[in-house]
Image (cartoon, helix red, strand yellow):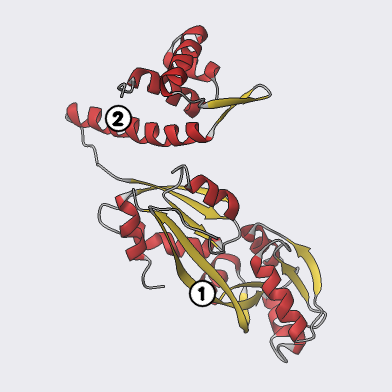
Amino acid sequence: MERLNYQHLYYFWAVAKMGSIKNACSMLGLAQPTISGQLAVFEKSIGNKVFRREGRKLVLTEKGLLAFSYADEIFSIGDELSTWLKGENAERRLKLRIGVCNALDTLVVRRLLTPLLSMPQSPKLVCFDSNAERSLSELRPLTYDLAFLNTPPASVRHGFSSQLLAALDMSIFGAPNLVAAYRDGFPRSLHYAPVILPTSNTILRQSLDRWFHSHGLKPQVRAEIEDNSLLKSIAATGEGLIFAPSVIRREMRERYGLDFVAEIEGVQERVFAVANHRNPAVAAMIRSMSSW
């Protein structure tokens, strides 16, 4: 097998990192024909296209995503080695790329990540916000080492594992002016109560709709918001009650000034982890989350 030309790989990495050949030329101090030519040679040598054109933009192909993942790690390690050889302090840290489903509560995700950040020699975390489908598709070409999802994957490929990390009970929260009005007489007090809900495409919303129906409740839906941070911020203005995992009750009060109303029986938010065990940092992270 022909050895990989790391100079060609570096030019490819620079273009992918900078987002265009023009920007890569500025970074490297080279002419555009030089970069374009070396990129063409690189694609020919590996027998695959690493970019495709979408209008005037260069977009990484699936092979390109995989190649960039490896190249980014290679040149990051190279920078560390260069620093160490010059006699400067260089901390060798594993990198862990994490895809986070944007339907999951960010305060819950923070709790998942905190134990890992506090570990001795903790890996460097690179987190991406994504929907569940994209998290899984990008885990396949190894763009991510780990994905947090709100739904279990239909199938798991060889070299990957899936596990349920948590099944979190849900509670109702609201600004103090609303809590006083709707805490008494729960759950009937929620009939026609102002609420802010996640969008209908989320699993949590579907569970809440079933819960409302089972209790004969028809709340006033003031807004439907996919981004849970925005949802909390609007709730903090007193516009409506919201639903969030009970485990973050303290954070809801401290960060958003939202008080606890009541816990909802039969509604949970589940958190799944899909992991690629190629990265040794993944096993450490899974162990750090075993207390959930």
Q: Which amino acid type corresponds to the residue marked 2 in the rendered image?
A: Asp
Identified at 31% across, 21% down, the residue is 2
Q: Which mark is residue 214?
A: none
Residue 129 visible in the picture: no
Task: State the residue position of label 2.
Answer: 79
Q: Earlier in the sequence, mark 2 or mark 1?
A: 2
Quarter of the view holding residue 7: top left
Position above or below: 34 against 17: above
Task: State the image coordinates of residue 106 (x, y, percent, origin top left).
Answer: 54, 60
Please give the residue where the numbered disc 1 appears in the rendered image. Answer: 167
In the image, farthest residue toward the bottom: 185
Q: Position of residue 88 (x, y in %)?
A: 20, 32
Secondary element under disc 1, as helix, strand or loop, is strand
Task: Count neighbours of disc 2 (C-alpha within 10 A) and say few if under 14, some if 14 to 19, many if 20 or more.
Answer: few
Horizontal side of 110 relative to 223 (left or right) equals: left
Most foreground residue, 96 or 231:
96
- Residue 223 vs residue 284: left or right? right
From the image, state whether disc 2 or disc 1 is nearer to you: 1
Residue placed at 32% from the left, 52% from the top?
281
Image point (51%, 10%), residue name: 32
Q: Nearer the viewer, residue 226 or 235?
A: 226
Quadrant assignment for the N terminus: top left
